[in-house]
Every structure is written in structure tokens, then in C-alpha cells.
Image: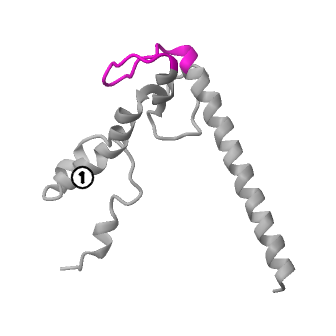
């Protein structure tokens, strides 16, 4: 591979990444603006109210954790402050860690969030 080919590949990669980031920002801005029009500017968990510059701390949480599921009526969204939103996404992971000794109980309860690495520890356990 020549230096000019590598340079072209790198430029093409950078262009593709930039386009993907722009598309993601547009998509997020679209559903965030919709959610802010539909719902009161209050965190759905801690009930803190937001206005002015603080509005940037109010985020859209997808209830089914699918960021591509954006119905126009907002039925898959709830407004959460950045702190409650972060907590919502870590809650399932924390719960799983605390109930490692009782896996049957964990399966009976609904999932509170998705963690792509939740079962990673099980892969490293040696079979008995």
C-alpha cells in the first residue's frame, strides 16, 4: 500500500466518521426538540424544573433503550436530568452486581437497563 493510498483511506475514514457524527447529532436534536415541546421541562425522576441555561442538563431517555424508536407522540421518551439519566443506565448493572449470588431472582425481575458487558464475567468463569 502506498503512502498516497493510505492518505486517501484516512481522509475517506475521517469524512465518513464526520458524516456519521453529524447524522447522529441531527437525529438527537430532532427528538430532543420534539420532547421539549411535548413535555414539561421537569425531570421525570427527581422532579427538578429546568429553564434557561440549565435546559442543557435535561436529556431525553428512551424507555426501551432504542435510540431509533422515536414515535411522534413521544411514548418512548421521558425527560431526565443528566444525573438521573446516568443513574437510569447504571441501575441495572448495579443491581446485577448486588444479586450475583441469586441469579434466579434476577431473571424474575424486569430489566432496568442494558449493559453490553453485563454477562462478560460469566464467560471467564471456569466450568465446574
Measuring from the top left, give residue 2's x and y in whole percent: 84, 85
* Residue under the image location 70 percent in, 50 percent down: 20
Residue 53 in sight here: yes
Looking at this rendering, what residue extends furthest in the left direction?
101
Measuring from the top left, give residue 127's x and y in whole percent: 23, 79
Q: Please count the marks in the image.
A: 1
Tell whether position 21 is magenta.
Answer: no
Considering only vertical position in the picture, is 125 above or below 42? below
* Residue under the image location 74 percent in, 64 percent down: 13
Tell whether position 40 is magenta.
Answer: yes
User: What colour scheme governs how the chains and residues are painted in the rendered image of this protein?
Assistant: one colour
- Depth check, front residue: 52 or 30: 52
- Depth check, front residue: 70 or 51: 51
Q: Quadrant of residue 15?
A: bottom right
Considering only vertical position in the picture, is 10 above or below 31? below
Considering only vertical position in the picture, is 14 above or below 21? below
Measuring from the top left, give residue 9's x and y in whole percent: 79, 71
Q: Secondary structure at mark 1?
A: helix
Give the magenta-colored segment's residue range.
Answer: 36-52
Looking at this rendering, what residue extends furthest in the front direction?
53
Looking at this rendering, what residue extends furthest in the bottom direction?
1
Measuring from the top left, give residue 75's x and y in whole percent: 50, 23
Along the horizontal axis of the image, is 42 left or right of 71?
left
Q: Main secondary structure of the magenta part?
A: loop
* Residue under the image location 48 percent in, 16 percent down: 51
Residue on which disc 1 sits: 96
Considering only vertical position in the picture, is 25 above or below 50? below
Crowding at mark 1 (Cα within 10 Å: few <14, some 14-19, many 20+): some
Amino acid at each position: 500500500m502506498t503512502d498516497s493510498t493510505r492518505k486517501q483511506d484516512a481522509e475517506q475514514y475521517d469524512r465518513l466518521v464526520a458524516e456519521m457524527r453529524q447524522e447522529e447529532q441531527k437525529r438527537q436534536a430532532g427528538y430532543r426538540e420534539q420532547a421539549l415541546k411535548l413535555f414539561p421541562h421537569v425531570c421525570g425522576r427527581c422532579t427538578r424544573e429546568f429553564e434557561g441555561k440549565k435546559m442543557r442538563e435535561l436529556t431525553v431517555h428512551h424507555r426501551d433503550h432504542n435510540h431509533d424508536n422515536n414515535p411522534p407522540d413521544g411514548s418512548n421518551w421521558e425527560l431526565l436530568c443528566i444525573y438521573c439519566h446516568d443513574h437510569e443506565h447504571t441501575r441495572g448493572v448495579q443491581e446485577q452486581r448486588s444479586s450475583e449470588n441469586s441469579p434466579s431472582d434476577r431473571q424474575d425481575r424486569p430489566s432496568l437497563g442494558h449493559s453490553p458487558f453485563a454477562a462478560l464475567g460469566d464467560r471467564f468463569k471456569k466450568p465446574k
